[in-house]
Image (cartoon, grey):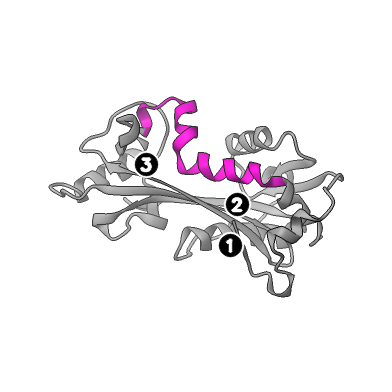
Amino acid sequence: MWLRNCGTLFVMLSAIERTKPMTKRLILVLATRNAGKTKEMKELLQDFPVEIKNLEDFGPIPRVKEDGATFDDNAYKKASFTAKVLGFPALADDSGLEVDALDGAPGVHSARYAGPDATDEQNNAKLLSDMAGETDRAAHFTCVVSIAVPTGGALTYEARCEGLVAEAPAGDNGFGYDPVFYYPPLKKTFAQLSREEKNQVSHRGKVFAELREEFEKVLIWLQRRL
């Protein structure tokens, strides 16, 4: 975890730990309209004094253009914009696949690698085509989570999962690049893993596990800025 754009409000974790725990329920807005992501976050944070909402709970909000150079840029852009517009702390995430032999591509363009409206199948097909004959198939998934307050400061969490680009798609589970991301320790692609197996090792699983582990500190940090 690190802090972003906090200026003189930067607080070391040791100082946060000396603050009394938060008891008042706090509203945290997810910068998404995805019901699945919302359900996942509610389950993850169900033991904490926080009320999870998403963009569907509010009126029309302009869509944020994800044109950042990094996952951190995009996650922060979505979280900070939502926090400023709605006046509540907001959480956003951004993730994607980075392939060594392609100089980090598809990277922040993972969702639109084969075009603006590309399907998962089209993105996977383009990736395998670009990797045809390539011996270095090392790749990793990255996920960044940003929790921003209306004044602009943010907490950032990041996690990675190392793997390889498979020679061909395999498996029916998951989404995105899961069928072509081979995870050597389990000798399967992500699409061949059960949901429980994937959550234990994936970039998203790791980053949200760390977030939950430190969420008492996160609540205290938020309390001091609202």
Say if 216 sits above or below 169 in the image. below
| Image position of 198 with respect to 91: above or below | above
**Labels 2 and 1: the sequence-earlier one:** 1
Q: The C terminus is located in which quarter?
A: bottom right
Q: Mark 3 packing: few (<14 Cα in 10 Å), some, or many (20+)?
A: some
Magenta span includes 192: yes
Amino acid type for the residue under numbered disc 3? Thr
Majority SS type along the magenta span? helix
Q: Which residue is mark 3?
A: 119
Structural crowding at the residue carrying mark 2, measured as other residues with C-alpha within 10 Å and reported as few (<14), some (14–19) or many (≥20): many
| Closer to the camera in the image, 223 or 168 | 223
Say whether disc 2 or disc 3 marks the residue closer to the N-terminus: 2
**Residue at label 2?**
92
Question: Disc 1 designates what residue?
Answer: 77
Gap between marks 2 and 1 measured at Cα: 9 Å
User: Helix or strand or loop: what does disc 2 sit on?
Assistant: strand
- For the question of whether residue 140 can be seen, the reply is yes
Q: Residue furthest right?
A: 24
Contact check, label 2 and label 1, Cβ < 8 Å = yes
Q: Which residues are magenta?
A: 190-215
Q: Amino acid at mark 1?
A: Lys
